[in-house]
Image: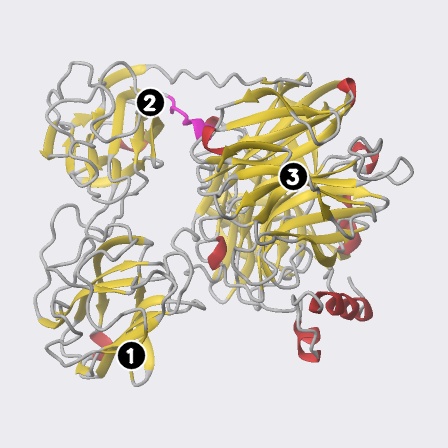
Amino acid sequence: MSRTTRPRRRLLAALAVLSGLGLVAASPAMADTLYHEQYRPQFHFTPAQNWMNDPNGLIWYKGQYHLFFQFNPSGNSWGNMSWGHAVSTDLVHWKQLPVAIPQDDNEMVFSGSVVLDRNNTSGFGTKANPPLVAVYTSLVKSTGVQRQSLAYSTDGGTTWKKYSGNPVLDLDTVNFRDPKVFWYAPTHSWLMAVALSDQHKISFYSSPDLKHWTHQSDFGPAGATGGVWECPDLFPLPVDGNPKKTKWVLAVNLNPGSIAGGSGAQYFIGDFDGKHFTADDSGTYTAPSGTVLQDFESGSFGDWTTAGTAFGTTPATGALDGQGTVTGFEGQDFANSFHGGDASTGTLTSPAFTVTSNYINFKVGGGDHPYDPDAVLGDAPTPTGEVLADFEGSTYTSPIGDWTTTGDAFGTGPAQGTLPNQNQVSGYLGNGLVNSYLNGDATTGTLTSPTFTIDKKYLDFLIGGGYHPASSDAPTAVELVVDGKVVRSATGANNEALNWASWDLSDLQGKQAQIKVVDANTGGWGHINLDQVVLSDTQAHAKSTETGVNLLVDGKVVQSATGSNSENLDWASFNTTAYKGKQVQIQIVDANTGGWGHVLADQFTAADKPALSSVQRAHWLDYGEDFYAANSFNDVPDGRRVMIAWMNNWNYGGNIPTTPWRSADTFPRQLALRTVNGKTQLVQQPVSELNTLRGTGTTLPATTVTNATTPLGVHGSTLELQTDLTPGSADRFGLDVRTGAGQRTRIGYDAGTGEVYLDRTVSGAVDFDPTFPGVQRAPLALDGGPLHLHVLVDASSVEVYAENARGEQVVLTDQVFPDPSSTGVDVFAENGTATLTRMQAWQLASIWK
């Protein structure tokens, strides 16, 4: 849980089935456009329409792969969780079937698994016709309690009946979910791996009949624990293809807290004896030794200076009043800015010192509020000029006249601060503000100013609330309207703290304009806050809301690190090789007064090697942002272990710009264990059935590039690329895909950091959520050898399988939303040379035609 080449005749038949469920209106127009919409994946599974998340119940049965999935039969956002259903004979071409297990008045049907009960241990079928049994998490709507229940099918998975004796396992908790069940032959019993999500544990249970379960053991906490654990999977794999040498793999998905941010999937390799899983990696870690710069063990801050009240007068020795348990600090003392709670602010700054090492390692915890280079630390002056509205009255009157409303979100006048059931609103001036949370996020409406003349260079204002840009389907935005057109817009940052924003109006001088505040969103963060609208000749700058540790050179921040919304301190590092011999300072900053508005820091050490955080030390199935709820198929022929994942992220999953469907699955991957440098590593490749989609292949000659980006003459929105790149003197090199119209998705290698990276900052539509644009990185040492890339490009995704000459592998999966015309492929090198020594490219056919 977490929160198809088809002949036209077969497509229409499928539409007829779906229309009977209210899923698709099978009109001629829809039949012509379905599966051909902008951004619709052409070789990844998507439902015909509506919301989808976790893959569930993956099983091969009588020649068909069954893919069940979390599905909303009623809309394109999360809700009404039921099990959708699709089948395939080849893992490539999928046929969507009617909803398999629907929600009802009492429960939503969350994630789980399906097994073939060959011996009819459950009694749901017969020995001649053994049943398929689904073990799923039942969410009790009235209480939120999560418990494990059964449904069964005796017609090959077409229809399902819920077991009258449900639930079969109930701990009376709201964080107990996502059972993965399989038959364990050595003990002739069923085994279940299920998540105790908030405890960062996976529980193992056994059963003789799928109805009665006995607890065997728990695994965890271990690895990455920055978010809740979900969707476990446990399975054996031979090492290096040797069936006599088998290891077990435990996959654990977590949200948030992944290596790329938000949702992700980690794994552990170890041994399983039917009761206990023991990981090969014990998880113990000792940071590189070095010269301690500050460990706070003297009981004072020494020559470090404080400003504000957040850090108190001396280091903390544990949790402060009102704070949760603090863990991970070294020794007895550490810096803690929770003095006075989250509402307090301040800084703790070291004296200047000369850098002599490659790294400064330290521990950091607390809030996840990164440094913003455009924000001002401390109090910035309020802009002066013509106040268009300060919202201090009981109605929407202002110096330029009365503002007008539509809908019910804005009421009859400004709010006096925080509204009922709303998190604390802060940052506004005076007593009143615009706040469209009236009666919650479900309300919508507009608030429009009278017409005014633009006669100053800037329009400054305070803004907060939801991040739903004006370009989205359901915005929460402030818009500037000139000549009937929206010429500027701004949105909140999913935060109730209002902060300054500013529009440069230099090109609009003398124009007549209106301000329109829009709340068209009924989902999470579906509201907007506004205050103090000023026409000014001074540009307002946002006030910093960071909680973190900064490295200062000449008083300017050159590197920063923040917490992960956790009271656990974890290792972080600054790379200081570029600053050797220079004077620097360390500054610990708490500028945030909202939730998780504090920072923890300890053990600053100058060292020659970087310290690695628990997230960096964890083993990741995928280093991209869009690989979650990963699970594998039961009973695949030939013993293959095939995995599929939800190709989305809870950070922004509900906001991706797709309709009438939302979310896709990754292309199925075959898993294996490989020994590299004496260590066992999980490796992945697209299943070989991908070859059935290949068109005529293209082989490109070797190409050397120097400080340039060179088109390769390959174009396509659905491509498979296999290439070898040999590093030369370039700092960075690699491939750009989906290029054109100023867009590209960059698949690069950074020689300085030894990392493969996937950059989607200019990949197309990126403005629908602040967490979407970014660069994901994965460590992969080349040591002068070539970089092998296997890349799958679809209409709205890029999957990258990267290997070095030793066989070490990293995988990165990202969604992208480029223009349809952006279909180019380039090779690039920055600050030096690199050589594309080999490339094969194939156009991939659509599975929906």
Q: In front: mark 2 or mark 1?
A: 2
Disc 3 element: loop
Residue 428 disc label = none
Picture residue at 18% right of the left edge, 41% below the top: 343
Q: Quadrant of residue 371?
A: top left
Q: In front: mark 3 or mark 2?
A: 3
* Residue under numbered circle 1: 481
* Residue under numbered circle 2: 327
Visible residue check, residue 729: no
Q: In front: mark 3 or mark 1?
A: 3
Q: Is residue 609 left or right of residue 598?
A: right
Amino acid tagged 1: Val
Q: Work out which quarter of the rendered image holds the N terminus and state it.
A: top right
Mark 2 burial class by Cα count in 10 Å: few <14, some 14-19, many 20+: some
Picture residue at 58% right of the left edge, 57% below the top: 72
Q: Position of residue 273 (x, y in %)?
A: 68, 16
Which of the two labelled residues, at mark 3 and mark 1, occupies the earlier sequence position?
3
Disc 1 element: strand
Q: Position of residue 366 (x, y in %)?
A: 29, 33
* Residue under numbered circle 3: 166
Residue 412 among those drawn in magenta = no
Q: Is residue 612 left or right of residue 126?
A: left
Q: Which residues are magenta?
A: 609-616
